[in-house]
Amino acid sequence: MTHDYHLAREKMVKNQLLPRGISDPKVLEIMSQIHRHLFVEEALISEAYNDHPLPIGNKQTISQPYIVALMTEALELKGTEKVLEIGTGSGYQTAILANLSKAVYTVERIEPLLVKSRQLLGKLGYANIYFKLSDGTIGWKEFAPYDAIMVTAGAPTIPQPLLDQLADHGKMVIPIGDRSSQDLILVKKNQGRFLEKNLGGCRFVDLIGNHGWKD
């Protein structure tokens, strides 16, 4: 029996995103379109649209759909932004950002994940994503400043290089806390000042690097 993924996506939006307050029509639309099942391991395809994160190998995960939607919505993308993503992972979040912004610069420290995501996103026809194998906690200075920064791993504190690379009036969303639980923090930069808002509890893999956790 071939699985009806279109239906699975519609159910995901209707049952997981809308009831929890995700309301940005563009975020809802793109999440109902992107084939999440292509970004998970073959053995887990039947769980692709379920309400939880899934392992993608190399001790990393693809985030729960709701968290992807929450983080994306928080950035309030209009389609003109240059976005920095820290943690390419499966490439699913990268694809969503690429559909909602002008360009995505994504940094991943685990080579097999980067190679796999780059191949998949290339095959899917994305031409506005730029990849770098590096320590994400130092950002990607060459193309800074960024209108939006998304960090998809938990850090003990906000890495200074990322604050430095955020454009004025830019927004960053990042999980901050200890290694077992974090709060999702939205940072807004306004004339060199940083305003923070707590979007609630979450749990992410560790952000490893110079300005994050040590491996």
Image: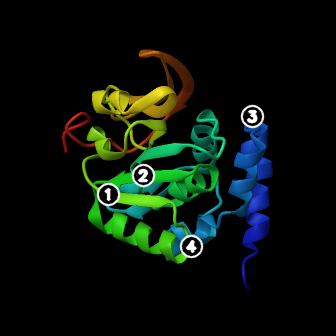
Q: Tags 2 and 4 in contact by the CB under 8 Å rule?
A: no
Mark 4 / mark 3, whichever is N-terminal: 3
Q: CA distance from mark 2 to mark 4?
A: 16 Å
On the image, the x and y values in percent for residue 211 come to 24, 33
Total labels: the figure holds 4
Disc 3, SS: loop
Q: Tags 1 and 4 in contact by the CB under 8 Å rule?
A: no
What residue appears at the point 47 percent right and 60 percent down from the top-left corner?
129
Q: Which residue bears the numbered disc 4?
A: 125
Q: Tags 3 and 1 in contact by the CB under 8 Å rule?
A: no
Q: Based on the displayed image, in which of its 4 quarters is residue 69 positioned? A: top right
Mark 1: which amino acid?
Lys
Depth check: give the residue in front, 110 or 1: 110
Q: CA distance from mark 4 to mark 3?
A: 31 Å
Q: Which residue bears the numbered disc 1?
A: 132
Depth check: give the residue in front, 39 or 125: 125
Q: CA distance from mark 1 to mark 2?
A: 8 Å
Q: Tags 2 and 3 in contact by the CB under 8 Å rule?
A: no
Q: Tags 1 and 2 in contact by the CB under 8 Å rule?
A: yes
Q: Tags 4 and 3 in contact by the CB under 8 Å rule?
A: no
Disc 4, SS: loop
Mark 4: which amino acid?
Gly
Mark 2: which amino acid?
Tyr
From this view, report whether residue 54 is shown above or below residue 198: below
Q: Which residue bears the numbered disc 3?
A: 21
Mark 2 / mark 3, whichever is N-terminal: 3
Instruction: Determine crowd level at label 1: few under 14, some 14-19, many 20+ residues with C-alpha closer than 10 A.
Output: some
